[in-house]
Amino acid sequence: MNTDFTENFVRSPGKLNQKPALVLNADYRPLSYFPLSLWSWQDAVKAAYLDRVNIVAEYDDIVHSPSVNIKIPSVIVLKNYVKPSTSTAFTRFNLFLRDEFTCQYCGSQGEMTFDHVLPRSRGGKTTWENVVAACSPCNLRKAARSIKESGLQLRRPVIQPSIGQLMNAGRKFPPNYLHESWTDYLYWDAELES
């Protein structure tokens, strides 16, 4: 028996699983930038069939049912507006996003941890206003000391970001996959180059 065919067939059922749809709110803005609001092509087709979304762009690929051929949606718009959240969740990921995945002491990028500006051993709380992204060397250098005692300086003030600030930060880190039909909807309010 040809095992290569069997393994390839099972492991790679087709490129259709790799055709996500960008989901836009009724105002034609993505529901979120980071993570980017994406649905599988199956969910997008189902939502279109149930008349919950409008399809505004499509892939060239077609899926078939016994009676219908459907182009796979690449951009869909919700028919009902979803009110965006007004508060920012304090998560490790959102903290790194606020700080743009950059150490707030030395400016290096890469593997990040987080650091309490006022150490917890001295009464510091785990809040937006007291935690920053830091590389391991700076975090170890600062340890349980104050910034002044460690000789380090913050690159910018530590604040709780708004949803808009996090969304703007997220635009700087596009996902690994961007279909050409998404560009107009992801960056329509970006400053144009002259």
Image (cartoon, rainbow, N blue to C red):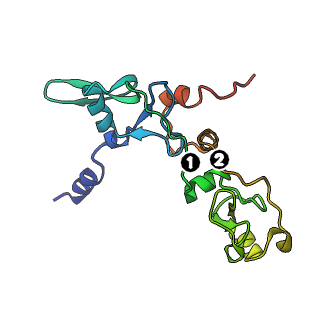
Instruction: From the top left corner, tell me how far across and down residue 191 is, in percent.
Output: 69, 27
Q: Amino acid at mark 2?
A: Pro
Q: Quadrant of the C terminus?
A: top right
Residue 84 is left or right of residue 150, and the answer is: left
Q: Residue at x 59, y 30 (%)?
A: 187
Q: Residue at x 75, y 69 (%)?
A: 138
Q: Quadrant of residue 11?
A: bottom left
Q: Is residue 183 above or below residue 143?
A: above
Q: Nearer the viewer, residue 26 or 123?
A: 123
Q: Given contact means CB atoms under 8 Å apart, are the residues at marks 1 and 2 in contact?
A: yes
Q: Quadrant of the N terminus?
A: bottom left
Closest to the observer, 11 or 64: 64
Residue underneath mark 2: 161
Residue 17: x and y, percent?
33, 43
Q: Kindly identify which numbered label has been placed on residue 88.
A: 1
In this orientation, which residue lies closer to the viewer: 8 or 57? 57
Q: CA distance from mark 1 to mark 2?
A: 7 Å
The crowding category of the residue bearing disc 1, from other C-alpha atoms within 10 Å (few below 14, some 14 to 19, many at least 20), is some
Amino acid at pointer 1: Thr
Farthest residue in the front direction?
123
Q: Give how far across and how far down residue 180 sits, in percent.
A: 50, 30
